[in-house]
Amino acid sequence: MRTLEEIVQLVFPGRCLGCHTLSSVICANCLEQWQVSKFKTKYSELTVHSAILYTPVAAKIILASKENGTATADQLLIQAIMGQIHTTAVDLQRIRLVPIPSSKRSIRSRGRSFMADIVRQISNQMGIPMLDCLELTGKTTDQSGLNRQQRLENMKGSMSMKTMARGELILIDDVITTGATLKEAARALNSQGFYAQISAITACVAQPLR
């Protein structure tokens, strides 16, 4: 007798997140653009560790997770980020995971705060505390069509602290393209009046930064 999951797969067969061909999660061809590795980017005073190059397939996986809430895409991002935490964090007992905040408009349209939800799942699986301490308080526009300088100006002063944060803080985001978002997040964390020990981990990285 077939299980419910097998019946669902027969009626609604899985499709690749990258090219939408019949496949389980990601096909062999698209998997070539989702290869887990180790990338280290120095941006301003921030060290950013990333797992995967930001390829067209990676962009589709992030979009499926962020805009559609696709569970399989979520898991690909979660596994990529967790792998980087394991390889880069010296003491898992000391670190705190800080998700990049979503705008109120995005939370309404997506039904969740994207990175906070991803980081919460990571926190539950790894037993590492999450500090959801940042919020977007300034007005920002969609960054997809902006160049690097425009993104820096767009994000400047847009984040603030909603709770105190201490310890070894690791900012978590889906992708670093220009570094503007992570730079603003680090500025907000350091606005508390003391210098926090901050690094960042992203699932994907654009090389070179745009």
Image: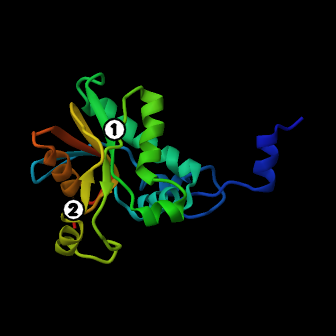
Quadrant in which the N terminus is drawn: top right
The extreme right residue here reads: 1
**Is residue 59 rendered to the left or right of residue 154?**
right
The residue that appears at 42% across and 28% down in the rendered structure is: 126
Q: Which amino acid does label 1 sit on?
A: Leu
Whether residue 51 is visible: no
Whether residue 33 is visible: yes
Asked if 53 appears above or below 89 in the picture, the reply is: below
Residue 6 rendering spot, x and y as whole percentages: 78, 43
Residue 185 rendering spot, x and y as whole percentages: 23, 52
Residue highlighted by disc 2: 180
Of the numbered discs in the image, which one, if any, rests on residue 158?
none
Which secondary structure, mark 2? helix
Which secondary structure, mark 1? loop
Residue 135 rendering spot, x and y as whole percentages: 32, 54
Determine which quarter of the picture holds residue 146: bottom left
